[in-house]
Amino acid sequence: MLVRPVVRNGYAYGPLALEDFRILPDVAGPVRRIREAGYLTVLATNQPGISRGMRDWETLSRMHALLRETVPLDAVMVCPHTDRDGCECRKPKAGMLREAAARLSIDLAASYFVGDTDRDVEAALAAGVTPVLLDTDYNQGVTAAHRVASLEVAADLITRR
């Protein structure tokens, strides 16, 4: 989780408007440490607001450009679809992770996927990746191989392996 989510009905959503887009404090350092440890850093994000007409690609691209100015990312993978579209890229399916692996020669079995939702955990497991769940108020019913208090703790876990 790199950006402050909008939480509605106990679930986290990405911000739709640029003025609501807030990069969380203290995320660049842990991501940089993970990258310096030899891992590629890839953001895989569901963005159904695109398909629903609630946000356009230009706004999303501007958000990702701002994010990349702060956080060292090797790639950003986006699924613009809704569940009804039945695509393979929308988490909890593993399409974005597999596509990133193919593009960047990533060994999925030696990889970690840090996220904050059940969809993140399920996508990681479907791709054969170790899930790391960031503990939040809205994911208390979700289980994962690793549940951590912060991205800093996730970076510690990953870089020690």
Image: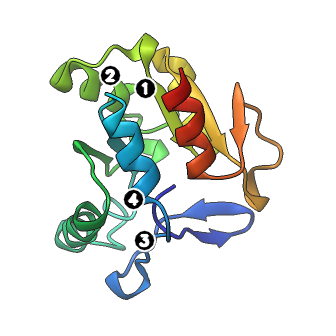
Res 146 → quadrant: top right
Decide: marks 1, 4 in contact (CB < 8 A)? no
- Distance between the Cα atoms at labels 1 and 4? 25 Å
The residue under label 3 is: 23
Q: Is residue 47 above or below residue 67?
A: above
Q: Residues within 10 Å of mark 1 (few under 14, many from 20)?
A: many
- Distance between the Cα atoms at labels 2 and 1? 6 Å
Instruction: Name which of mark 1 and mark 3 comes first in the sequence.
Output: 3
Instruction: Name which of mark 3 and mark 2 comes first in the sequence.
Output: 3
The residue under label 1 is: 94
Instruction: Name which of mark 1 and mark 4 comes first in the sequence.
Output: 4
Residue at 37%, 81% (x, y): give it: 17
Q: Residues within 10 Å of mark 3 (few under 14, many from 20)?
A: some
Q: Nearer the viewer, residue 8 or 105?
A: 105
- Distance between the Cα atoms at labels 1 and 3? 25 Å
Amino acid type for the residue under numbered disc 2: Arg
- Distance between the Cα atoms at labels 4 and 2? 24 Å
Res 133 → quadrant: top right
Amino acid type for the residue under numbered disc 4: Ala
SS for tag 3? loop
Q: Is residue 67 visible?
A: yes
SS for tag 1? loop
SS for tag 4? helix
Q: Is residue 14 above or below residue 77?
A: below
SS for tag 2? helix
